[in-house]
Amino acid sequence: MSKDLSLRSLLRDTALSPAEAKILMAHVLDKHYQLPRSALLSRDEMTLYAEALADWRDLEIRRLNGEPIAYLVGKRGFHNIELYVAPGVLIPRPETELLVEIGLREINRLNGPVNILDLGTGSGAIALALAYESLSAQITATDQSFEALAIAQKNAVLLNIAARVQFLQGNWYEALDKNMSFDIILSNPPYIASQDSHLNQGDLRFEPVSALTDHGSGLTCLEIIISGAKCHLNTNGLLAVEHGFDQSEAVVALMKQADFHDIQTHLDLGGHYRVASGRK
């Protein structure tokens, strides 16, 4: 008797969690058959042809070995957009959507054309989510990685918002002309300390190290961003930075040291202080 290789049996017999198995199988069905995710139920008796089955087995093994789902399927949802992602960029996290929400609130408060800077844009998540939501936002996004900028630019084209986002290569403010100024500066910089054991766990093992850690205390990049922000912020302009779950006090202290006012701390969905903001 031949082995049952129906979708139903493949999903039942895999060592993957049901949720992850369905994501990867839906990817296979879309790639090889142009079928929607609903086919996992409506056509669960179908069998995969050899190439599709080999693709499923490859994805299954790679995920069991720890490769992130987002890299395997090449995309990740973020805020109200879907982003192309690859190993050259950090995988966008739900926590970072907090920066988008803070940016959108400030855009609404200003109620007019707004210039925004996204430092260390990676896949373009923050910059593109804001451009997608707000027609009044003109956004500059920087990154030191040419590979990351190529991915971010691809996402801008895919989302049809490339005309409102300018991408510049360089390390933090070094990418900018000296006279460039903004109403809002946002950043999700590397903030994991170099000795943190989390760097050797889970998805982080596969993500670009330079996007995760400053190779020091975890505060080096945050200090550069905060201390340099005033040279590129308009009067009463807003700076908001993401930081580690245990770094809030240190980041607030850096903002006070840089003479920011109206300093606020912001909780993520997990109840951790994840973003600090202040005004010039």
Image (tube, rainbow, N blue to C red):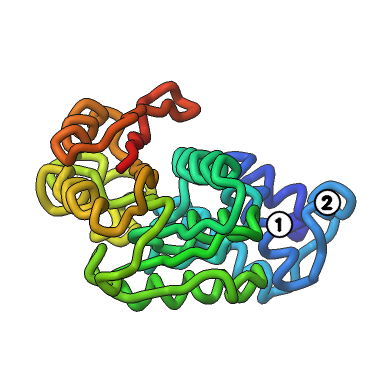
Q: Which mark is residue 8?
A: none
Identify the residue position indicated by label 1 in the image.
26
Q: Is 8 positioned to the left or the right of 133 in the image?
A: right
Residue shown at 44% from the left, 55% from the top:
91
Q: Quadrant of residue 6?
A: bottom right
Residue furthest to the right in view is 42
Residue shown at 67% from the left, 61% from the top:
27
Residue type indicated by callout 2: Ser
Could you classify mark 1 by the number of other residues whose Cα lies within 10 Å: few (under 14), some (14-19), or many (20 or more)? many
Residue sitting nearer the eye, 80 or 185: 185
The N terminus: image quadrant: bottom right
Gap in angstroms between the C-alphas marked 2 and 1: 8 Å
Residue shown at 68% from the left, 52% from the top:
10
Residue sitting nearer the eye, 11 or 212: 212
Q: Is 151 positioned to the left or the right of 278 in the image?
A: right
Residue type indicated by callout 1: Ala
Identify the residue position indicated by label 2 in the image.
38
- In the rendered image, residue 137, in percent from the top left (x then y), is placed at 56, 59
